[in-house]
Image (cartoon, rainbow, N blue to C red):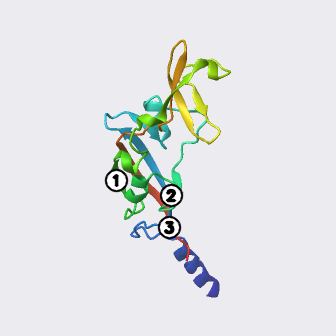
Amino acid sequence: MFSFGLLILMAEDITEDTSKRIENGDTISVNYVGKLENGTIFDTSLKEVAIETGKYDQMRNYEPLTFTVGAGQMIKGFDEGVVGMKVGEEKTLTIPPEEAYGEYRQEFVREIPVDAVNFTPEVGMRLATDNGLTGSITKVNENSFVVDFNHELAGKTLIFSVKVVSMEERKG
């Protein structure tokens, strides 16, 4: 009889309370599709969507994204947008630039003389600075090239379709 009671207790321990709403400090896993306002998909955790849209990367694992809500691991609008959701719930988050990657800032665009570097600049090439900034070369001419240090999604409103697949409540 004692072991029978123990089995029931164990079954209760693994039952998920799907009515619990997400709060800061909870660790959650979500599947998502990220789009721009024009409908262009820029990222997804779903392999089939990546294949469909030509964004598939065979080096990537397509699986739910796991993060701790409110810990600053995500852009602000995503972090705040999942608060109050439940496991199994789907929601569309529309995130303005100031809650995503910020406004596009012209001062983050630099023109660099070609003779200041020891490589041949090409459009699309990614560069990193000593202080950790990364940028993309957007224009090359005979004497100089332009590097844009803005995040590629800066200045854009992002639209995420999000589905919560699991939640682990904050400990303590």
Residue 148 coordinates in the image, percent (x, y): 49, 31
Residue 135 coordinates in the image, percent (x, y): 54, 33
Residue 25: which numbered mark, if any?
3
Residue position for label 1: 91
Residue 145 coordinates in the image, percent (x, y): 53, 21
Give the label, 3 or 1, closer to the camera.
3
Tag count? 3
Task: Measure the alpha-carbon separation of dots 3 and 1.
Answer: 20 Å
Task: Measure the alpha-carbon separation of dots 2 and 1.
Answer: 20 Å
Disc on the earlier residue, 2 or 1: 2
Q: Is residue 130 above or below residue 75?
A: above
Which amino acid does the dot numbered 3 rest on?
Answer: Gly
Q: Are marks 3 and 1 in contact (CB under 8 Å)?
A: no
Query: Quick one: label 1, few (<14), some, or many (20+) residues within 10 Å?
Result: some
Task: Measure the alpha-carbon separation of dots 2 and 3.
Answer: 11 Å
Depth order, front residue of 106/161:
106
Q: Is residue 119 above or below residue 161?
A: above
Depth order, front residue of 34/98:
98
Residue 21 placement: quadrant: bottom left
Give the label, 2 or 1, closer to the camera.
2
Q: Are marks 2 and 1 in contact (CB under 8 Å)?
A: no
Residue position for label 2: 72
Disc on the earlier residue, 2 or 3: 3
Please tell me whether mark 2 sits on a helix, a strand or a loop.
Answer: loop
Which amino acid does the dot numbered 1 rest on?
Answer: Lys
Please tell me whether mark 3 sits on a helix, a strand or a loop.
Answer: loop
